[in-house]
Image (cartoon, rainbow, N blue to C red):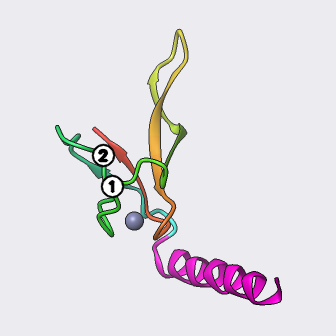
């Protein structure tokens, strides 16, 4: 149990460091790929690792209010949105 916990903590710290290394405004915008969605940074393709969320800084329509989507890679922490 102790070992497992320390591994999890280590991983969390690793991800934290890689996020700190990115620019804070480093939200990439990429062309929508025809194939599978994958991380533009590390190439992760597992959709369980790619988290979709609402990008409130990207308003597509004022009325009705529609926001764009953004994606975050659970492996390397990269965030991006698609055109
Ligand atoms: Zn990634």
Check the image and report above or below for 38 versus 75: above
Check the image and report above or below for 65 versus 3: above
Quadrant assignment for the C terminus? top left
**Left or right of 66, for residue 9:** right
Marks 2 and 1 in Cβ contact (< 8 Å): yes
Check the image and report above or below for 79 versus 11: above
**Front position in the image: 42 or 4:** 4
Quadrant position of ligand 1: bottom left
- The residue to which callout 1 is attached is 45
Q: Number of callouts in the render?
A: 2
Which quadrant would residue 10 be assigned to in this image?
bottom right
Quadrant assignment for the N terminus? bottom right
Secondary structure under the numbered disc 2 in the rendered image: loop
**Who's the residue at 65% across and 83% down the image?**
13
**Front position in the image: 51 or 70:** 51
Which quadrant would residue 42 be assigned to in this image?
bottom left
Q: Position of residue 33 (x, y in %)?
A: 19, 42
Q: Position of residue 32 (x, y in %)?
A: 23, 40
On whether residue 24 falls in the magenta region, the answer is: no
- The residue to which callout 2 is attached is 37
**Who's the residue at 46% across and 70% down the image?**
76
**Residue 29: which numbered mark, if any?**
none
Q: CA distance from mark 2 to mark 1?
A: 6 Å
First to last magenta residue range: 1-23
**Who's the residue at 42% across and 64% down the image?**
26
- Classed neighbour count for the residue bearing mark 2: other residues with Cα under 10 Å, few (<14), some (14–19), many (≥20): some
Comparing marks 2 and 1, which lies closer to the viewer? 1
Q: Position of residue 22 (x, y in %)?
A: 46, 75
Q: State the residue lying farthest toward the top.
A: 64
Sequence-first tag of 2 and 1: 2
Confirm if mark 1 falls within 8 A of ligand 1. Answer: no
**Who's the residue at 49% across and 82% down the image?**
21
């Amino acid at each position: 149990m102790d070992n497992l916990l320390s591994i999890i903590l280590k991983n969390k710290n690793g991800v934290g460091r890689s996020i700190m290394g990115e620019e804070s405004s480093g939200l990439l915008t990429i062309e929508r790929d025809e194939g599978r969605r994958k991380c533009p940074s590390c190439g992760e393709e597992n959709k369980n690792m790619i988290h979709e969320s609402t990008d409130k800084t990207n308003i597509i329509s004022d009325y009705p209010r529609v926001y764009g989507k953004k994606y975050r890679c659970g492996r390397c922490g990269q965030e991006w949105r698609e055109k």
